[in-house]
Structures are given as C-alpha cells and as structure tokens.
Amino acid sequence: MTNTDIYIMNDDTAWCAVQVYGPKSQITRLKRLCITPNLSGTKKSYWDFSIRQLFPTAISSFPSVQASGFEARPDHDSNQYAFKFDTSNQFPSDVFKHLAVFFTELAFDCDCIDSLDEFMGYGWFNPPSGGENFRQNMRVPSNYWTTGPGFKRSPAKQKMHQDRIAKLLMELRNASSEKAMPTSKTVR
C-alpha cells in the first residue's frame, strides 16, 4: 500500500454517483473534455475532473477535483452516461454547477453519502421539469444501510424520480429519432 492508499482509507470520504442524461453528442463531448486520466504513477486508478480547459480564466481560483475510484458504468442507452467516484469530504458541487452552465443540454442526476454517515445528498444540476436541485446537507437515516435498496429518497419520491427519468429518456429517444428521420425535402 502507498501513503496515498492509507490516506484515502482513513479519510472522511464522500461516495458519489452521477447519472448524466442528454443528447449523445453532448455526452460524448463531456467525456472528451472533462473526464481525463490523472496519471499519478501509482497502480491505483485516479481521475481528474478537469474543467480548467472549459473555464481558462478560473485556473487559479477553481481547482480541479481529485477523485479516486472513478468507475464508468456500462452505457445501456446512448442518451445516458453513469459513473461513480470518491472524493475527500464532500460532493464537488462547484464543479457540477460549472458543468451545468457549460453543458446546458445535459441533466446531471447526482447523489452522495459520507463514509462516516455524517451527511448524504441527492438532486440535479440542470434538473428536468419537476426535478429537485442538488443538496448534500441531509441526515443519513439510522436504518439507511439495513432497510433495503439504499435509496436516499422516500419510496414515493423515489418512484416519482424514476418516472421522471423514464420520461426524460423517452423524450431524448424521440428527439434522436426525429433527427434521424428524413424530412419531406430530403425524400426523393
């Protein structure tokens, strides 16, 4: 184990997950511009959410976020991209506020929980209609780890959240298929 490994294991860590919804072209652009490997010389996988190239004037005042354990989840839908990562102390809200401004066509559905159960959070950056803005100052219920699938919302709110996502994906798929369909001007 390296000193970095020991630090991360003993650190107050926020476990974070992000689902990104939007046009495939914008998701591809997000991955290309913002999620770049940070080669630290160790075998452990570290990633740097680098937004410096998007906001060059913020280089000195807006540090990148070092995230360990970055793992992209398999893409099951071309209008969705999911990943998880760990950060020190809290979810990087400032990074995602900037990303939401730069990627206005993407909706970022985020959640986190503190490794010491001091707080949890969930919500959206660029929320779809009816979606709640991200907050990370919520209490972790005492029975959170023992009562089932680990949803941070109440069962009723979780159902509404899942319905909202299904509607958003349907709208994105319909928009993609409409772009792919030839118009009467192009049909001969």
Image (cartoon, rainbow, N blue to C red):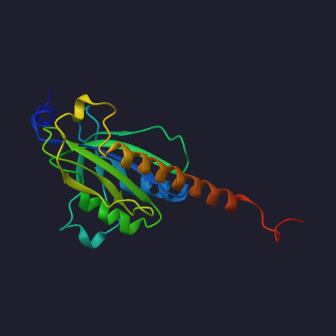
Q: Residue furthest right?
A: 188
The C terminus appears in which quarter of the rendering?
Answer: bottom right
Residue placed at 37% from the left, 69% from the top?
Answer: 101
Q: Position of residue 151 (x, y in %)?
A: 32, 40
Residue placed at 14% from the left, 47% from the top?
Answer: 89
- Relative placement, left or right, of 168 versus 116 is right
Residue placed at 47% from the left, 37% from the top?
Answer: 74
Residue placed at 32% from the left, 55% from the top?
Answer: 123
Q: Quadrant of residue 10?
A: top left
- Relative placement, left or right, of 185 versus 58 is right
Is 122 in front, or is 60? Answer: 122
- Relative placement, left or right, of 32 versus 179 is left
Is 84 in front, or is 70? Answer: 84
Q: Position of residue 131 (x, y in %)?
A: 39, 59
Q: Is residue 52 visible to the viewer in this orientation of the structure?
A: no
Q: Residue furthest top?
A: 1
Residue 22 lies, with reference to residue 84, above or below; the image says below
- Relative placement, left or right, of 128 versus 97 is right
Q: Is residue 30 visible to the viewer in this orientation of the structure?
A: yes
Residue 63 lies, with reference to residue 80, above or below; the image says below
Q: Quadrant of residue 147?
A: top left
Is 155 in front, or is 90? Answer: 155
Q: Position of residue 114 (x, y in %)?
A: 18, 42
The N terminus appears in which quarter of the rendering?
Answer: top left
Q: Position of residue 46 (x, y in %)?
A: 27, 41
